Amino acid sequence: MSDGPDVKRLKGGRVECVVTFTEAEIAPAEEKALHELSRDIELPGFRKGNVPMDQAKEKIDPQKLFEATVHHILPPAFEKLIKEQDIKPIIHPQVEAVTREPLTLKIVFIEKPEVSLKGVNKIKIEKKNPEVDEKELQKMIDFVLDKNKQNTEVDREAKQGDMITMNFYGTGEDKKEIEGIRTEGHQVEIGSKVLIPGFEDNLKGVKKGEEKEFTLTFPEKYHAEQLQNKPVTFHVTVVKVEEVLRPELTDEFAKKELQAESVEDFKKQVKESMQQQEVTMESQRRERLLMEELTKCTKVELAAELIDEETRQMVGEFEQQLGQQGMNMEQWMQASGKKPEEVLTDMKAQAEQRLTLRLGMQQLVEEKDIDVTDEEMDQIVEGFLGQATPEQRKEVESAYQKGAQAYEQLKWQKKVEKALEGMLA
């Protein structure tokens, strides 16, 4: 690098290095690039890949040669700059060509930006003592009993609480069938209020095999816009009528079906389970509020490159989640009505929030001097090993060796948990 690099340390952890390369540095990189690009060149009198470099160079696109040369010159340049300028990059550097002759590149590194916490010691998150309401408890008990209900087909008129299996379709005021309504074998319990208002009431008194027509107007806020406030005539054919028999909660039923010693034991189990769920939800609520407050207290200037990198990572994570659901980004955007630029804007805002919280959390751990001892880590890793199968044990031991990436990530996670527990105590 001739005359040394011009280095500027800017806000947001941005380190700009303008570097001019000497011929001695360019030549070996260009030679590597020529060897790579000449492999597919064929000239009369020469075997493929054995064309002399001077003749191969004439056949190679200058832009491709330039890009390949820069590609080979960068790794040693990065290493030298990082070492000599004591740069601690947290993402891959960005490169921009300034001039070609002499070859001058602007290399932008992003270090961890300066972070300060303002007012973090004033954060107070209200702690509630969650209790299980008796009405909610009864709802849960009814839900469990409903899961154990049995249906018996009956030859009589349908009444409240009966299960109706039916086929139906709908027509508009023009007497033509409306697309998307026709349904075969649909089941509904009269009184469940899962269908539009009035539908289930019209099923009272019907019998198996009966055909019935009635007209209803769809609600103003119905999810399908094309049906909102629209009058529709339903044509229903009753396939069968079933009486829904809910079990009576007795000691015998509790023992046989609910893995409880008695009705009181069952109620106790349900209440304890609901209570634990309420405690967990309260803990999550307080943690979420703490994260929000910590983000507000975190003062940091983020480099655009850092935000862009985080955004790309979040988009990749989201695409992976969609893939697990059998969708791709394009399908999701069509279903949600989002435009690509809207998705990017939303993701960028979320990326800024995530970065700010992460950096604030790191600062909090440092300021509070939170540590996790080797003994604590040994206990945690031992717990993982205890859950592993004999075949998995070696793999787990290797992944969580002291100093390994997974080990350090786990240690950091435990530090964060300690910091949060301290603030929520």
Image: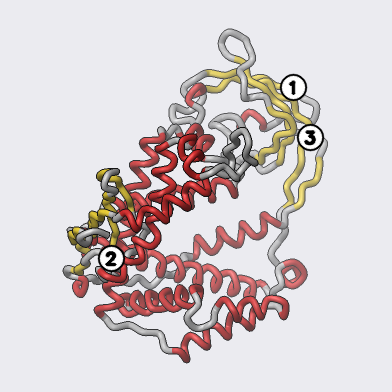
Task: Out of 311 and 170, give the one closest to the viewer.
Answer: 311
* Left or right of 251 in this view: 15: left
Q: Helix or strand or loop: what does disc 3 sit on?
A: strand
Left or right of 403, for residue 233: right
What residue occupies the far top of the structure in this picture? Answer: 174
The one of 238 and 318 positioned closer to us in this rendering = 318
Could you tell me which residue is drawn at 77 percent across and 47 percent down? 151
Q: Is residue 271 left or right of residue 7?
A: right
Vertical comparison of 180 with 69: above or below: above
Q: Tally the numbered discs.
A: 3
Image location (x, y in percent) of residue 412? 41, 75
Disc 1 from disc 2: Cα separation: 72 Å
Q: CA distance from mark 2 to mark 3?
A: 68 Å
Q: To which residue does mark 1 refer?
A: 211
* Quadrant in which the C terminus is drawn: bottom left
Q: Earlier in the sequence, mark 3 or mark 1?
A: 1
Q: Amino acid at mark 1?
A: Glu
From the viewer's perspective, tell me whether residue 363 is left or right of residue 257.
Answer: left
- Quarter of the image for residue 114 reads bottom left
Depth check, mark 2 against mark 3: the one in front is 2
| Residue to which mark 3 is pinned | 240
The label number, if any, that marks residue 112 in the structure image: 2
| Residue type for callout 3 | Lys
Asked if the residue under mark 3 is in contact with the one under mark 2, i.e. CB atoms within 8 Å, the reply is no
Residue 227: image location, x then y, percent? 51, 23
